């Protein structure tokens, strides 16, 4: 199952890159895509060279970052890197830190990908530490190539000391706010893929043994970081690391208990068909910074919310293809705006951080249900026209039929009782499908109110039969699997 819907909401690649457009813009990318028998454009994820070109093109196209990736080094998976970076951004916002941000990337690698993205996106100052001399040289070149040497420093690290205390002592002007680390996941005597694994990996494997394997695996490496962090204590505000295996997360939660570290949290990094885990801890008191209330993403326990403090948010969605009537994305948005205006619903469009012509988001607020009986009201109006000779109901009788008297009518606008407060996200998928997602935020209309508005949209788009047929096909497939 694809985990894309659980990606961090700020992650640019929550919406898939348009490979067709990239192939037209960049000739070097075009040679790594092909058209299958159905006419769909495909990318060769099994090729290391293709993955390298993809990483370079996405960095250039989406972030104006130009890097060199040595042949024998790890090729960064950008959605995963961004999930990690945006989580750190969440942690810093939770700590109410906005200025003078300085971070340390442990094992920055030949590309120096984390510091470059952090500095480029947020203007943070970063120090990248690396034990491999060739990777240090390559990382420095990439920093200079992007004119970020005023924000990023690359240091050659000692094999035996992960967090060099001299870095802390020499930083007179700023205190370090966080560390981050993408450790070698595998033990030296551990196979990267189990022999009994039924399916081969979806992507080509990249990176050399020093980047992927280490004596004791990630558990021993991260345990050394934790032990050093106990010594450094609050010299660094928030310590973080990525974990490649769920068993490691279970192990470290027990280790934290053994070491009396109770101010910590963890999250999940979901991208494509791969899941990784993030771990963060601090030695600050919970009165100063409580990580246990920090934003996290957890697929099973917190599927609808980024924040553990908030209640799970109910959401509904539907997907349908563009056709002769609904020909393009702009027409969909224009029609939605018109219907919202006709229903007298307050609307506030949200400007996306990464401006895209393939998505649209707005917040809506209404003080009454103006859509559930729209059809009935039209029928009544039509009936009154046809049967004009019959005695007409006066205003009081009409209100009695609707369950109100004239003296008991509710003015929602005046009392400010919110019936429904929700958001709409519209996304163009693969150039020919529309996905509309509704998320409930507040209101006494609750889940039923949101469901009825979804049905209203389905009726307006006239896709009820399409969705019914789609659901029938899905049920048949599930029966065959069973």
Image: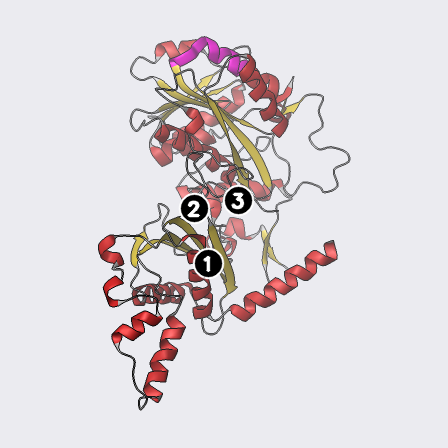
Is residue 7 visible from the viewing direction of this image? yes
| Cα separation between marks 2 and 1 | 39 Å
User: Of callouts 2 and 1, which one flags the residue occurring earlier in the amino acid sequence?
Assistant: 2
Residue 35 lies, with reference to residue 153, above or below; the image says: below
Q: Nearer the viewer, residue 410 or 276?
A: 410
| Residue on which the image places disc 2 | 61
Residue 253 as seen in the image, left or right of residue 8: right
| Residue on which the image places disc 3 | 54
Image point 25% across, 59% down: which residue? 411
**Foreground disc of the pair 2, 1:** 1
| Residue on which the image places disc 1 | 451
Q: Which type of secondary structure does the marked residue at label 3 adopt?
A: helix
Judged by its main secondary structure, the magenta piece is helix
Snapshot quadrant of residue 73: top right
Image point 55% across, 70% down: which residue? 465
Q: Nearer the viewer, residue 390 or 471?
A: 390
Which segment did they paint magenta? 224-235
């Amino acid at each position: 199952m694809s985990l894309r819907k659980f990606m961090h909401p700020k992650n640019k690649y929550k919406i898939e890159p348009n490979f067709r457009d990239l192939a037209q813009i960049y000739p070097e990318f075009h040679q790594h895509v092909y058209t299958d028998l159905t006419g769909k454009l495909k990318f060769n994820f099994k090729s290391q060279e293709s993955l390298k070109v993809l990483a370079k093109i996405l960095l250039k196209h989406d972030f104006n970052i130009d890097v060199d990736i040595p042949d024998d080094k790890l090729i960064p998976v950008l959605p995963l890197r961004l999930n990690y970076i945006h989580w750190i951004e969440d942690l810093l916002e939770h700590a109410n830190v906005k200025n003078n941000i300085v971070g340390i990337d442990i094992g920055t690698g030949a590309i120096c990908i984390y510091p470059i993205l952090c500095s480029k996106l947020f203007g943070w100052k970063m120090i990248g530490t690396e034990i491999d001399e060739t990777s240090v040289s390559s990382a420095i070149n990439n920093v200079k190539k992007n004119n970020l040497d005023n924000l990023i420093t690359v240091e050659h690290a000692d094999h035996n000391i992960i967090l060099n205390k001299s870095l802390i002592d020499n930083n007179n002007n700023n205190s370090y706010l966080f560390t981050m680390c993408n450790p070698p996941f595998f033990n030296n005597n551990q196979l990267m893929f189990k022999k009994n694994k039924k399916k081969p990996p979806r992507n080509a494997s990249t990176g050399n043994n020093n980047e992927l394997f280490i004596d004791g695996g990630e558990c021993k490496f991260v345990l050394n970081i934790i032990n050093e962090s106990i010594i450094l204590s609050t010299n660094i505000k928030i310590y973080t690391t990525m974990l490649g295996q769920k068993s490691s997360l279970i192990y470290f939660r027990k280790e934290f208990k053994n070491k009396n570290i109770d101010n910590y949290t963890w999250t999940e990094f979901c991208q494509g068909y791969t899941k990784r885990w993030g771990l963060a801890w601090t030695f600050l008191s919970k009165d100063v910074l409580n990580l246990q209330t920090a934003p996290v993403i957890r697929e099973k326990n917190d599927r609808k919310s980024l924040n553990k403090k908030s209640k799970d948010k109910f959401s509904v969605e539907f997907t349908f293809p563009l056709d002769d009537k609904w020909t393009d994305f702009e027409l969909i948005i224009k029609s939605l705006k018109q219907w919202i205006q006709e229903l007298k619903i307050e609307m506030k469009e949200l400007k996306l951080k990464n401006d895209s012509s393939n998505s649209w988001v707005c917040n809506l607020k209404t003080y009454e249900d103006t859509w559930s009986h729209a059809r009935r009201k039209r029928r009544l109006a039509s009936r009154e026209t046809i049967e004009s000779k019959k005695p007409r109901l006066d205003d009081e009788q009409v209100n009695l039929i609707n369950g109100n008297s004239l003296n008991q009518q509710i003015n929602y606008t005046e009392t400010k009782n919110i019936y429904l407060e929700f958001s709409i996200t519209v996304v163009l998928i693969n150039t020919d499908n529309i996905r509309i997602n509704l998320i409930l935020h507040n209101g006494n209309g609750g889940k039923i109110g949101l469901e009825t508005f979804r049905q209203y949209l389905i009726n307006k788009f006239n896709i009820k039969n399409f969705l019914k047929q789609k659901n029938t096909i899905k049920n048949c497939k599930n029966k065959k699997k069973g």
